[in-house]
Image: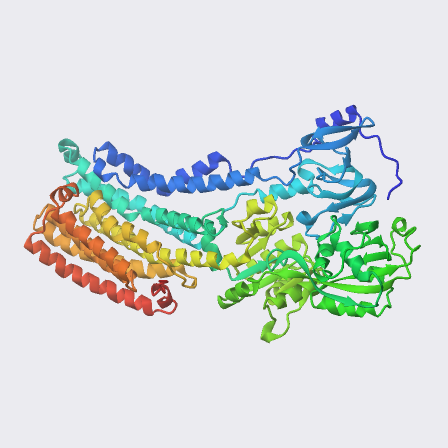
Amino acid sequence: MSTTETPLGLTAADVAARVARGEVNVAPESSSRSLAAIIRGNLFTLFNAILGIALVVVLLVGSWQDAVFGFVLLSNALIGGLTEYRAKRTLDRLAILDAPNATVLRDGAEQVVDLHGIVTDDILVLRLGDQVPADGEVLTSRGAEIDESMLTGESEPVDKRPGDEVLSGSAVVAGSAVVRATRVGTAGYANQLTAQVRRFSLVNSELRSGINRILVYVSWAIVPIAILLVWSQIRHHGGLDLALADGTWRNAVVSAVAGVVGMVPEGLVLLTSINFALAAIVLARRKVLVQELPAVEVLARVDVLCLDKTGTLTDGTVGLTDLIELTPVPGAREALAALAADPDANASAAAIAAGVTDVPAAPAQVLVPFSSARKWSAHRTDAGAWVFGAPEVLLEAGDGVLQQVRDLADTGARVLLLAAAPADALTGAAAEGGPPRGLRPAYLVVLREHVRPDAAQTLAYFAAQGVTVKVISGDNPATVAAIAGAVGLGGDGGRPVTGVDARTLPEDGEALADVVTSEQVFGRVTPEQKRAFVHALQSRGHTVAMTGDGVNDALALKDADLGIAMGSGAAATKAVARLVLLDGRFATLPGVVDEGRRVIANMERVASLFLNKTTYAVLLAIVVAITAWPYPFLPRHLTLVGALTIGTPAFFLALAPSRQRYVPGFLHRVLMLAIPCGIASALAVLVVYGTLHARDAGLQANTGATLTLVIMGLWLLGALARPWNWWRVALFAAMAAGAVLAIAVPFVRDFFALEVPEPFTAVLVAVTAAVGCVAIEVTYRRRKAHPGAAEVHSLAEVR
């Protein structure tokens, strides 16, 4: 306890001078991503510009039937914008400092001021329950203990004495203190942490990145091809002058737009967003909040999972496992019962109740309350005086009981001692801060954290999936290692797992990466080290997931490929996490992995359908531009083909159950199937359309080309839908029936500008499409036999 005289505080003039210099407790509140930036980023893209121009052109020439693709454009921009705006709002609401007011000394009197009204050198008066509003230095302390667990990971309250530093965002849990504010506003610990946490970033999604890469390549290729296509269509209609004179320029423009729209896999982006959203809905029913949609996919790609011990492997509570009698002392068990019955008992004392149900709690008088600085407490019963606390503090260094305590601690136990004290031994002990002497050890109280019953099973699941689990904790390495061993984690070759003391780790990045990669269990890890661990693992090519619940975990969670917060965690941690386990159950994660695998595997399956279309559309546009043929399709023809062979079936296939293990190389595998199939489709269309165009067949040529694409598209759909089951057969049959109805029903046929095929057209289409289907089948089988591809294209169906 300090005897320093309490200062009078700043004067009004002092405060005004500091306010004028900007030394106030104010920090910027917005994230790095403004609403305008979100709108620009999602609306004004090259992809949207191309489709937007095409949409405007089609509407201007009056061909509204060919403008259906505009709905996909709007949906893509809307889904992307809303997702980012939701993330921005979450970050903007984040605040580690949540106390609205603070008590300060000014002009010799206490005043209550707004949190943002605190200035440098203000004298803060902190009492039990107060949140520390600014970083500062303790001037006087009356038994002040500060809970810094959410900031630093320190599990026990920290005793603060004059000259000690306090951090903004921590809380007073005992006593009171007078503190001089040394850092306010953006310089304060809490605000610096908030600023880093608020940095806007998107989760690294392989699906999204691969699709965006395709869109960029296609978008840049579209510009020159579109110019050539418009020029060739006008040339086909007799040149610019004639096209303008007789109005055929409108047909040329619509044909060019059809070629452009066909090259853009616009539905792939929309379907990806929908699939992520549906996965988020499924997980929400399992008490998992998905804060960024692609996060569902990321956990399926994770190969290193970093866990905190408390709250993940254990439930954060302790239980009594043994009471070891050291010396028979009358009244000792009743004294233990009194500790457990105390309404102000901490979790450790309360856990003793399970072992002393056979005796009544003796009436007790608290002589010395527990303090994290003392690490012991004292009380009196009718049988005498008792002390209870850490054995290493209460016993002399050479006492033989301490070896027994160390042996128990090595197994992960927390050991406390109850000892009888001489009646007069406590007279000055509390004031002096030291324990009394002449103690008679009575009982060792052995406590252990409750291990979650499903922790071992969950860890076994991740081990079977090839995911390396690392336990990272601020607790004693031996304790952490014991808990890890209890849930089935083991060292290489089956050797017992040992904990690494993080205080001994090198600071060099490469050396740290070597240790972090090779070891499994770490204790005494600081918040800064957690973040460094993530970076070290990422530098070795790992995809890292990190769990946490305290503010001290926030930066590590943000920098990890996937941050996972517990529902009971700090608001700041939940705000930056991509996933929040609302019920705090670690066992929920395998279900998230399954959903991620379903998304990845099924999107890879359907992406081949979309990129097959992009491939044949690009090739057709180039050939048409060179030959000056009319483009084989109107936009509505491609809408029909897309609905029957791509969009509708892709939606259902994307929702199919799948637990296929993630295999890297999504984009490469998709292109290796889509490009050859697209080339085969383009060649088949050119044969059919070229033959019929040479015969001046008119709409028969368009009809033949459309039917050829439909047949080959259905064949590719059938290949990707394997293995067959009842609903996939029904889906394929429905799409084939739709193609028949498009020709057979007059008003549908007229809307899509088709004709009933003449015999020559029907035979030509059948023969050419059959050859094309053989080419697709050969390509599919060769890809399936390729190393790494068989397991992707033969996804195990969960029935």
Check the image and name the residue furthest to the left. 759
Left or right of 718 on screen, residue 117: right
Please state the horizontal and vertical placement of residue 236, each as a whole percent of the image.
16, 43
Residue 38 visible here? yes
Please state, as top left, top right, bottom left or bottom right, where the C terminus lies in the image.
bottom left
Model colouring? rainbow
**Residue at screen point 16% across, 34% down:** 241
**Residue at screen point 17% across, 62% down:** 770
Residue 216 visible here? no
Left or right of 384 on screen, residue 637: left
Q: Nearer the viewer, residue 759 or 395?
A: 395
Please state, as top left, top right, bottom left or bottom right, where the N terminus lies in the image.
top right
Left or right of 612 on screen, residue 12: right
Which image quarter: residue 418? bottom right
Left or right of 101 on screen, residue 271: left
**Residue at screen point 43% across, 56% down:** 595
Count of labels in the image: 0
- Does 783 appear above or below 113? below
Please state the horizontal and vertical placement of residue 713, each as a whole percent of the image.
23, 56
